[in-house]
Image (cartoon, helix red, strand yellow):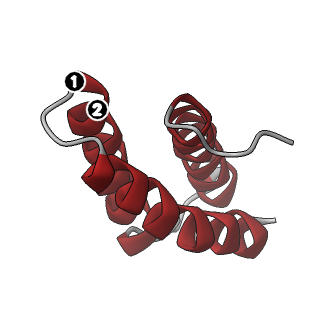
């Protein structure tokens, strides 16, 4: 599950970043780029070595993935 979430993030980050770059000067751009930075930070992190650590990490990845999907859709990306 964690690897799938990471894979989705790795594929979505460049697209959201590219769309944000085209929306120069807008608030949506800055919000999207902040979310991209947050997503990259989550990808650099690792699950904590304690009970529930991997599950908590998966939840954090899922939340930032949802946020990236929202930015993608708001910036004219395809929704599925």
Q: Residue furthest left?
A: 25
Q: Image height check: is 80 above or below 37? A: above
Query: From where the camera sits, is residue 78 visible?
Result: yes
Residue 27: mark in rendering: 1
Q: Residue at point 38% right, 62% down?
A: 18
Residue placed under numbered mark 2 in the picture: 31
Q: Residue at point 54% right, 29% down?
A: 74
Left or right: residue 73 versus residue 36 is right
Local crowd size for mark 1, using a 10 Å CA cut-off: few (<14), some (14–19), many (≥20): few
Q: Residue at point 46% right, 54% down?
A: 16
Residue 37: mark in rendering: none
Q: Position of residue 52 (x, y in %)?
A: 66, 50
Q: Image height check: is 67 above or below 49? A: above
Q: Position of residue 12 (x, y in %)?
A: 58, 62
Q: Image height check: is 51 above or below 26? A: below
Q: Quadrant of residue 1?
A: bottom right
Query: From where the camera sits, is residue 48 visible?
Result: no
Task: Please say if the residues under marks 1 and 2 sit with CB atoms less than 8 Å apart.
Answer: yes
Left or right: residue 53 versus residue 80 is left
């Amino acid at each position: 599950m964690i690897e799938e979430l990471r894979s989705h993030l790795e594929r979505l980050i460049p697209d959201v970043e590219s769309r944000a770059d085209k929306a120069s000067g807008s608030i949506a751009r800055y919000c999207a780029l902040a979310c991209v930075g947050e997503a990259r930070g989550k990808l650099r992190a690792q699950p904590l070595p304690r009970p529930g650590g991997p599950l908590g990490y998966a939840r954090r990845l899922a939340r930032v993935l949802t946020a990236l999907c929202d930015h993608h859709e708001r910036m004219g990306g395809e929704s599925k």
